[in-house]
Each structure stands twice: as C-alpha cells, then as structure tokens.
Image: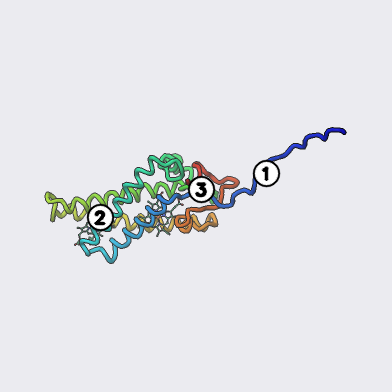
Amino acid sequence: MAATAPVAVTPNPGPVPRRVRVWDPIVRIFHWTVASGVIANLTFLRHEENPHIYVGYVVVTALVVRLIWGLAARNHARFAGFVPSPSGLIIYFKAMLGNREPRYLGHNPAGAAMIVLLLVLLAAVGTTGWMMGLDALWGVSWVETLHEISANVLIGAVALHVIGAIVESIRHHENLPLAMITGYKRAAEGTDIDNAPIAG
Ligand code: HEM
Ligand code: HEM
C-alpha cells in the first residue's frame, strides 16, 4: 500500500483580537479615585476641613502608588513608555495640525504632556495642603495662597485634559473615557502606535 504524503498543517492563528486590555486596574483605580477626590475637594468639601484633609490624603496616597507603578510597570502605565520628548511632542502637534496624527494605544504625546503636568500639580496641591497643617506653618498665608493657586491651575489643566480626551475620542472614533473605566481599547491596526505590551 502506498504511503500517503504527510499533509502540512498550518496552525490556526485564531481570530485577531478586536479589543486589547490597555489600562490595568492600578491605572484605572488611580484615575477615578483622583478625579472624584479632586472634584469633591474643589466643590462640596472645599471648606469641610476634616473630610477635605482625609480625601486629600487619599488622593496623595493614590498619587504615590501611581508614581511607583509608573517606574515598575512593564505595560502602558510605564512612564518611560509615554513621557514625550520635546521633539516628539512637536512632531505630534504638527501631525495634529495636518489632521493626520496617528492613533496611540497608550497615552499620545500631547495627552502624556498634560498628564505629567497633572501629576506635578497634584503633588503641589498635596504638598501645600500637608504644609498647612504643620505647626511651624499653621496660619502662614503664603502656604495657603500656594495651595489655592495650585488648585486653581489644576482646574484649568483638568478642563483642557477633559476637552483633549473628548476631541481625541471624536477624531479616532473611540470612547477614551470608557476605556479608562473598562481598560479595553480597539486593537492596533494600520498606522496605530502601540509601544507597550498589553496590560497584565
Ligand atoms: C480632577 C479630575 C481629573 C484628573 C486630576 C485627571 C488626571 C488624569 C491622569 C493623571 C491621567 C493619566 C492616567 C495614568 O496613566 O495613570 C488621566 C488619564 C485620562 N483621563 Fe483623566 N483626570 C481627571 C478627570 C477626567 C475626566 C472627568 C475624564 C472624562 C472625560 C478623564 C478622562 C481621562 C482619559 C480618557 C484618560 C486617558 C487618556 C489617554 O487615553 O491617553 N479624566 N487623567
Ligand atoms: C485633592 C487635592 C486638593 C485640592 C484640589 C484642594 C483644594 C483646596 C481648595 C480649593 C481650598 C480652598 C481655598 C479657599 O477657597 O480658601 C482648600 C483649602 C484647604 N485645604 Fe486643600 N486641596 C487638596 C488637598 C488637600 C490636602 C492633602 C490637605 C491637607 C493634608 C488640604 C488642606 C486644606 C486646608 C487645611 C484648607 C483650608 C480649609 C478651610 O478653608 O477651612 N488640602 N483646598
């Protein structure tokens, strides 16, 4: 009996994933803790001294965890993966003006620059808030002024941040705030830029 020739079996690569997990739980919990804490402290807890301080410290704790995670993580949360260089930022803005900026799976350079500013402002608000409670600085007006100024600059930065998130959501046909809740985004395709492994 003639032996039948072996048939080459191509492994089935399976369906290409349509959604990938980009934001891990630490990033998402950090984001919504900080956003709700900051909004509460700027509005109904603004003059409620004790709750304001407790919520402020929750925000500061979330910030410290995120800063450590930004150095330790190997996914899109890693600072080294998204903090833009000045030239990278200029290239991205030029592409935006020409309406041809690529879609990023992680933070895009403009969003990332704003995120760095938000992190610095959060640290400034937290530090000046903590300083206000020190015996040596209690009632010292320049500390209170710095706390208020950094909080006001933070309001402006958050407004630009939210506008940016909405504009980029429209331009790239995806709901970025929803992705910050679920962690999932549309998988990279074509000219999309994905410079980190998917979230673990
Ligand atoms: C006080 C309010 C807020 C603060 C301080 C804040 C701060 C931040 C920070 C620090 C990040 C970076 C996340 C990370 O990598 O860990 C971020 C990302 C993000 N935030 Fe906010 N946020 C605020 C409110 C909001 C709101 C209300 C929205 C909804 C419209 C929003 C939408 C987003 C989105 C979509 C991203 C991811 C951006 C991207 O895809 O690159 N944020 N935010
Ligand atoms: C989440 C970040 C925070 C934001 C956005 C924020 C914002 C503000 C704002 C807008 C005021 C009111 C200034 C005025 O109108 O006179 C204020 C007051 C104050 N903040 Fe904060 N703050 C934050 C965190 C903290 C922290 C971490 C502390 C202390 C550990 C703190 C302690 C205070 C104190 C003692 C006052 C004076 C309260 C009063 O009027 O009786 N804050 N803060």
Q: Position of residue 43 (x, y in %)?
A: 29, 65
User: Residue under circle 2?
Assistant: 149
Q: Position of residue 169 (x, y in %)?
A: 50, 57
Q: Residues within 10 Å of mark 2 (few under 14, many from 20)?
A: some
Q: Amino acid at mark 3?
A: Leu
N-terminal of the two: label 1 or label 3? 1
Q: Position of residue 81 (x, y in %)?
A: 44, 41
Secondary structure beneath dot 2 equals helix
Which of discs 1 and 2 lies nearer the camera? The answer is 1
The span from disc 1 to disc 2 (Cα, nearest Å) is 59 Å
Secondary structure beneath dot 1 equals loop
User: Residue under circle 1?
Assistant: 12
Q: Amino acid at mark 2?
A: Ile
Q: Residue at x 59, y 47 (%)?
A: 189
Q: Residues within 10 Å of mark 3 (few under 14, many from 20)?
A: many
Q: Residue furthest front?
A: 1
N-terminal of the two: label 3 or label 2? 3
| Residue toward you, 5 or 97 | 5
User: Residue under circle 3?
Assistant: 105
In this picture, is 195 found above or below 184?
above
Residue 164 figure quarter? bottom left
The span from disc 3 to disc 2 (Cα, nearest Å) is 34 Å
Q: In the rendered view, does 6 fall on the left or right side of 27?
A: right
Secondary structure beneath dot 3 equals loop
The span from disc 1 to disc 3 (Cα, nearest Å) is 26 Å
In this picture, is 88 found above or below 111?
above
Q: Position of residue 79 (x, y in %)?
A: 40, 42
